[in-house]
Image: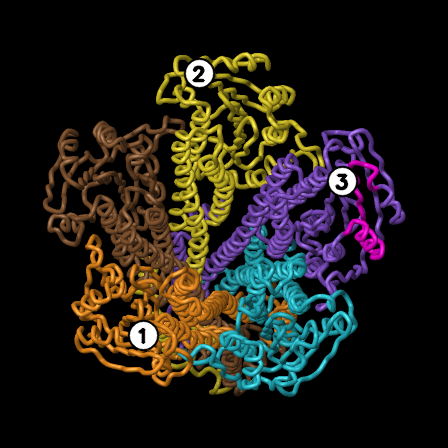
Chain colours: A cyan, B orange, C brown, D purple, E yellow
């Protein structure tokens, strides 16, 4: 996973800051103006009606099918995947007496998680973690009314199959409970869906951490930056979720039964755990920048030390060799380089060089740039 | 856009911190003292009166025209572009019984967005994003009273044409609603007008991000600094807007009908989204400074490594060549450089140099400064 | 101004952290102990009594003059400049029934701005920006009672002349209003007095910003540090002012009329604007440290690159020249430096050097350290 | 301890971010689904029943033993070590009428500390510091009901032996008090158990601090990073503990007697002290990064200075030796290196070199890079 | 003072993080367990009884002496210096009906400042600045009851002598007021005792600041780090003091008379001033790290520049000298170094070198690395 991330460094950042933000209604439009996202999918409507005794699943092709299903069961869950067919969505909205501002929010799929109380229903917006394309999130809107739950998703494919199975197989007491419990079950699935995503990031972060500590490489900083950006994006999705669920738990609303609030409180705890993990990762990722910079400068220090030691030892030696490579003519004057003609001239020159080198080595060792100290530094 | 920005690096910063702040009434002046901004435009008054059945647009040349228009329609929108003619503004203020402190705030065009309740009207100040000169903003002041909305803009040119069109063409239910809904519609247009500005910054930020990650250049830091300053300026305009709209949504006021509050809540959500995007950009921009510094120091590290390797290998070799370039006279003593006269002296010297070079190369490779490791580092 | 600042770098910091803090009553003294600041000025008392019809200004030499003036006018403003004569101040305090703790606060001129309600009067402490010695501030204490306003300043010279002029010339409705309006007018003058000081800092900051971006110099960091310290000092004066004015606006007190609160709200808005500007400057100044460090390290990078390129090219070349400068005796062996005697030996050696140099140049250019890339980097 | 830590640098980070997070119920599961942690221990049940007169300790093998013990004593403490046997835990849960959500939280051992009020009991989750494996913490769940305290621990081994001893030996008034006092005593032991852990970190931090200040080494940064991560982990355990105990102290609950609240307030004070210490350590650890970076760059500066001085002095000298090592033939022209044949040529050349060297040394000393100043810098 | 600090760098940090934290009651002990600090002093009890008319000071050897003194005077101040004799302290505690938790807090001398209301008295814990060993603080506990004030200090020696003198000499109205006023007077002395400590730090900070700006030295960073740690320690003592005094001012308690609250409000203001000064110092100290790093890197830059200029100029020159130092035999070929035999060979070579050097100097000057620019940089 780490590999894929770093491979996509060049293309991914471009998209992630502005993605999903461009296609808005122009400033000044009438509120409630619905404008389809050109990339939106055709809606697919699945209806699950159930009560303690029985359950029925149907796919609605037309708006009439939806109307027919409602009222027959204690709880009806109408789920719409895909938001391309605005007429259909408007028709459903009319059927459930949805406020046009709420309907606009369903179609503009970049809402923050929130809960709004309308006369007939609660309007709940939350965001699902996208499994294969984190940190991007998909908007999930719910209308919780009397005996029905109307949900809208951007795309087919969600994390609600375990919930559907519990309804079908009559596991837990979901079939006995009302639509508010169903709404809780879906919210809980949404919240729990962030845990595997965060765990993946946790693993990536650990791999990154380890490799930065072992040997900092120049693309690490881009990886850390991307990690921080992704965690920032997740944060923007998760934090308001917390407020939203807190509002559901706290505010008195006739649509949510008292016994369901206990479950929502549990769901709230999970959100707090998510935030805890997320903030920890963010702090660790921030700390990694320091680690990276320190490692790079420690390495540079090391390199400089080697250069300094070798250069500093040989520079005076080379000067001496240069000195005796001069061509002053000793024949014209006894002052001109008489050393060249000494009997032990060469050995003395070599000895001088050895002394200079030894002196410098001693100086370096005393400074702690050599040997023992260096061994401590590098651990080899 | 990125190009223009970096081109204007030298001239722009000068103006942006103190712009629009100099021309204040001197300390100690009587409150309500109106002092015209020398750069202010001559006022241009446009009046739109409308009701469910009909609409009428006029331009008012004199104050009497304004008086005439009021009272004829369920809702009258008096819009003043330009704040240079203080007498005219005072006259309008008197007509609508505006408090002199509020009128002073209209003319001093650097107010923070706020809402103030007066006896006869609500006084709402907000700031519009300037389209061609972001991050600068234009003050937009509204007086929302019974059946009228009096608005003041610094300059002609605004983002309200879609609203005017909705009034003219009877789109949505704006013609049925009161002046409070009109105020909402204008505020909503103001808030939505920040989205394209922020999107432009988002794009610039991505381009900058990409190019810093690819190859840090010395003017990047100035660009990041300017980006941070611009976002800071936008933040100062947007944050108090949020408080202002929140106050409108929350506080009971007879001038705002209950059904309009639902729309204001929607507008508030948009402001929160703006803040979300803005704060994300600010964090990303702050992170970019780290990325820049890391990239620069990684590059420096790279350069130092090359220098070190080449210098460190050749310095001892050059010493050896210098050694045998000395002119000690081998004729006066058998100790003086006998190597020069050995049969294999030269090949042996070359061999010695090769050994030293090989040893150093081996040392560098073991340290990971060469070959394999370096290949990892640079990806080539 | 920039020049003066940097010139005074060495002397100014010493005084600014502890200035005005040393001369306190010793720990454990009885509360209300008045100890004169040795540097305090002799008090100068100016009394302005006024009502809607008339106004009278006198200078009080003795405490009896003050007593005489009070009660004759609807509003009496007793202003004391200079706090050296403790007996006089105690006498005035007794006259106006001032609590001894409040009187101690008047003399200890390093109070935070605050408002305290006593039985007979409100005690308001605020701080005036010193015009010629920012960021230092002067304490300004007010006692607002029934029909009188008693004010104490550290030094003669203030920003209240426009207010006095409004009283004399009957401008605005100050003559009709009570002592609370006078207190507001003075507070407003105090708050507005910070704007020019901040504007000066804004200009200095821009000049500094520009010159850091153009060419970072080693004294810039001291200038930024001083700028940050000055802004910090201003912040400590302005923030509590905000709380103080907010308390005046909010808290019910019989000494402040309802219609004056509208004006105080306006004054509060100005304080918020001050804080806005101040915090922006602080963020910009903080960002400048990053810019400075980045610029310095970019410059260093540039210097290193030049050194590296020149050194790296010439080091191998010098090695070759050294090689053929060795004195191995080619007469004793055909293996000893036969190249020296080749017909094209010298041209071949030169060619070899040219090849090495060309190879290294190619390597550098491929790395982007030369030519095109460098041109991009430096823009020349 | 410092040694062990740094030795385990490579393996430890891997586990600590995601540890204990993987084994969750899959998203969408019914709430209250119990899934045993594969690493969980078999439950071991110890029952202590006591009253003012007597005390009895038993180990329960079967669920019936637990039932039998309850009711016989004024206070019964049922402690379960190990959470592997879900059937057993479910049975106990049924016996004490525990809500299934609470039971799920008991088994999912990564809950944040919290307190939840149920009809029959308070559910309190807290986290014990693991003595040998800090910063990891063990979940400790309590159900405080009427006359009983039911506790669950992940593993055998806890810090409650002093409490058991106080019950057995009738020390303090624990035997006279109710189950709420027992719950307090356990919570107090849990909170106090963090002190030795934090003290260990404090000592490690001081050792690290001292060694960073003495001589920064390249693995210090990894140690600081790990320290910061560990403190972050502890913070996540301690902060919510504070909220939890504060809620116990504050909220009226029939399960906690008024006189026990005084003790809980004392326990709350301890938590605040923990947080105080923790935050201080975190700030000190953060400051250490700066110290490390500064020390490293100061050392680099030192190394560069030595290189510069030696290189800069010898480079011109070597140039001079090179100059007079050239082989221009003085026989073909009087212009070709006549110096070589001067009578004092060699001494003059040596003198020139000495002058250059002296000049450079003077220049360096004037710059403060040599001698006196350097002595100040390094203190040797 | 600066000198002493830096001298003690190596030994002091060790003690300051964990000092006074080790000797706690073991986790799980019964609350109220008193364990004497081995370093505690033997208690010395001084009793001052006073009323408006008279005052009496005695030293109590036995507990009976204390009992005797109480009740005889309107106000009795029992002061205990030293906490070693637990039996004595328990006896006093029994006498004044002190809760055993409060008594435990008296002996465990690392409590945070706090105020707790018990039935018979207020329990107030505060911390006195140690005069000779800042930033360490001494715990000062007070029990304020009806007509008595019982205080405990860790050591003999405090800052309360001026208060005792005021009682003896009947200065101010302390003799007329009750025990609550005495408690205020002591608290005020405690708070005011921090001012000289902070002033000392302020002076040290300024000296440090100046010397960092003048010439950064490698031990500065350790000094800044220690300064930040000391200020952090002071912060931990002062901040909770603020809450404590605020609680005394705010909360209704029968032990504190209404007229004393005015004095406590004054004391609260002093605490806010302390915090103001402290936070300013902390920000300035944090900024100093940036200044230090910048100065160090500016110095390094300077050094690098000199090295670069000298090396870069002489490297090509040395190459030329090396070139003409080669021994190619011009006798075997006309191609072999014919320059050596040119008539103007040597002057031409010197001229070539001069051109190269001049070219490089021109290049450097154009880059701004030389002369004019450098002059600006260094100001010499």
Residue ID for mark 2: E50
Q: How crowded is mark 1: few (under 14 residues within 10 Å), some or many (20 or more)?
A: many
3D distance between C-alphas at marks 3 and 1: 71 Å
Q: Is residue C198 left or right of residue B285?
A: left
The magenta stretch is D70-97
Q: Is residue B73 left or right of residue C322?
A: left
Q: Which dot, 1 or 2, sits closer to the camera?
A: 1
Asked where in the image residue B4 lies, by quadrant, the reply is bottom left
Task: Give the residue displayed 61% in from the left and 46% down from the top.
Answer: D247
Query: Secondary structure beneath disc 1?
Result: strand
Q: Which of the numbered marks, if any, corresponds to residue B75?
A: 1
Please determine whether, in this image, residue E92 is positioned above or below residue E254.
above
List x then y, in percent, for residue E229: 51, 44
Q: How crowded is mark 3: few (under 14 residues within 10 Å), some or many (20 or more)?
A: some
Reply yes or no: does residue A238 show up in magenta.
Answer: no
Query: Secondary structure beneath disc 2?
Result: strand
- Does the image show residue C300? yes
* Chain bearing mark 2: E
List x then y, in percent, for residue D323: 43, 70
Q: Which of the numbered marks, if any, corresponds to residue D147?
A: 3
Q: Is residue B6 left or right of residue D85?
A: left
């Amino acid at each position: 996973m780490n590999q894929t991330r770093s491979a996509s460094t060049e293309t991914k950042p471009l998209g992630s800051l502005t993605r999903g933000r461009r296609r808005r209604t122009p400033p000044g439009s009438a509120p409630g103006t619905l404008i389809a996202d050109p990339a939106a999918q055709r809606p697919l409507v699945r209806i699950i009606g159930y009560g303690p005794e029985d359950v029925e699943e149907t796919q609605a092709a037309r708006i009439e099918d939806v109307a027919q299903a409602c009222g027959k069961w204690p709880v009806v869950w109408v789920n719409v995947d895909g938001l391309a067919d605005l007429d259909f969505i408007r028709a459903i909205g009319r059927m459930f007496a949805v406020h046009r501002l709420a309907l606009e929010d369903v179609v503009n799929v970049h809402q923050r998680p929130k809960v709004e109380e309308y006369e007939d229903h609660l309007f709940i917006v939350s965001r699902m973690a996208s499994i294969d394309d984190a940190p991007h999130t998909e908007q999930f809107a719910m209308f919780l009314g009397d005996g029905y739950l109307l949900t809208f998703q951007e795309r087919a494919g969600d994390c609600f199959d375990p919930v559907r199975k519990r309804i079908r197989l009559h596991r837990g007491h979901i079939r006995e409970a009302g639509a508010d419990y169903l709404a809780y079950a879906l919210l809980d699935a949404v919240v729990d869906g962030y845990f595997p995503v965060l765990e993946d990031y946790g693993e990536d972060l650990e791999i990154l951490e380890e490799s930065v500590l072992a040997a900092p490489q120049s693309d690490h900083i881009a990886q850390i930056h991307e990690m921080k950006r992704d965690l920032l994006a997740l944060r923007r999705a998760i934090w308001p979720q917390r407020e939203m669920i807190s509002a559901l738990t706290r505010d008195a609303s006739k649509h949510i039964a008292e016994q369901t609030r206990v479950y929502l409180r549990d769901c709230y705890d999970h959100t707090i755990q998510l935030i805890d993990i997320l903030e920890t990762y963010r702090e660790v990722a921030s700390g990694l920048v320091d680690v990276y910079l320190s490692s790079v400068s420690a390495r540079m220090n090391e390199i400089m030390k080697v250069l300094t030691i070798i250069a500093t030892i040989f520079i005076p030696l080379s000067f001496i060799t240069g000195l005796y490579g001069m061509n002053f003519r000793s024949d014209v004057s006894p002052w001109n380089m008489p050393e060249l003609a000494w009997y032990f001239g060469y050995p003395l020159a070599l000895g001088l060089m050895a002394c200079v080198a030894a002196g410098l080595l001693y100086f370096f060792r005393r400074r702690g740039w050599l040997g023992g100290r260096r061994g401590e530094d590098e651990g080899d």
